[in-house]
Amino acid sequence: MNIGALIIGDELLSGKRQDQHFKHLQSVLAQRGLELTWTIIVGDEAEQLERFLDFTLATKDLVFSFGGIGATPDDRTRQTVARVANVDLLPHPHAVAEIEAQYGQGAYPNRILMGYLPVGSRIIPNTINRVPGFSFNDHHFMPGFPEMSWPMIEWVLDNLYPELRDLSPKDEQIIYVIHGRESDLLPVMIKIVEDYPTLRFSSLPHLGEVPHIELSLRGHTDQIEEAMALLKAAIERANLRWLNQLDKQ
């Protein structure tokens, strides 16, 4: 299952606030042997938000979305999900009950609007003020406030995906090509990607006092060994020198 993050808010794009969700979500997923496949940061503008939700809701990805589920005019996530999914936005009985339990008559006329959810949604408990987030298919929509949304991440993973663990590649090998150029090794890189599609390959050039390329292969150990042998042979044919991770340290 691919895992994505949708982080919403004009304040992030303008620089008024710095995003905290991306790094935290990476950490939470890593503890379960999982990792992000993609991340999108988008503002509050309705057309842009609809464009990206139209894309993500069409996938089967597990998506964590942060921000835009409040009741103010710039909070458009609930309405946009309903529009993209072609369902009504109606009072959700469990969400309404939570908001009424927290605020009583003070829930009306405004706070209760946060209990209007796309039909087919399930609520995500909010341990801070009981105004819930919501799940729609495998999308999970949470407030932008970390103190509210971060416990929701844990709740979603523990309660809805308890067996979703250990999907990240466990094995990795890294070598460093000293004074190498990526163009010198492009043919073998292409061959490895084509012949070993389940491996995750990366090439990261580094400038500085000792320019080098960091080459990484992640995946099944046997395939890593085979692909790495091809890579090392190509490096030597190019009259370049490689070091393994321990040597570099």
Image (cartoon, rainbow, N blue to C red):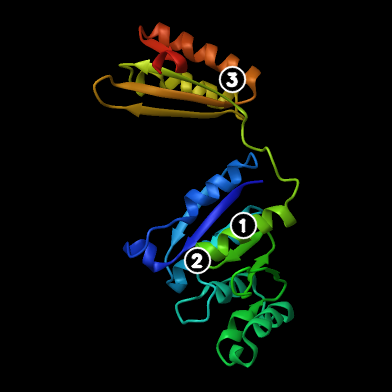
Q: Are marks 2 and 1 in contact (CB under 8 Å)?
A: no
Front one among 79 and 102: 102
Quick check: 52 above or below 99?
above
* Residue 47 picture location, percent across and down: 46, 71
Dot in front, 1 or 3: 1
> Dot 2 corresponds to which residue?
145
Q: Is residue 204 above or below residue 32?
A: above
Front tag of 3 and 2? 2
Q: Residues within 10 Å of mark 2 (few under 14, many from 20)?
A: few
Structural crowding at the residue carrying mark 3, measured as other residues with C-alpha within 10 Å and reported as few (<14), some (14–19) or many (≥20): many
Q: Is residue 83 above or below residue 184?
A: below
Query: What amino acid is at disc 2?
Result: Phe
User: Looking at the image, which residue sits at the far left?
Assistant: 209
Q: CA distance from mark 1 to mark 3?
A: 33 Å
Label 1: which secondary element? helix
Counting residues from the start of the chain, the first of labels 1 and 3 encountered is: 1
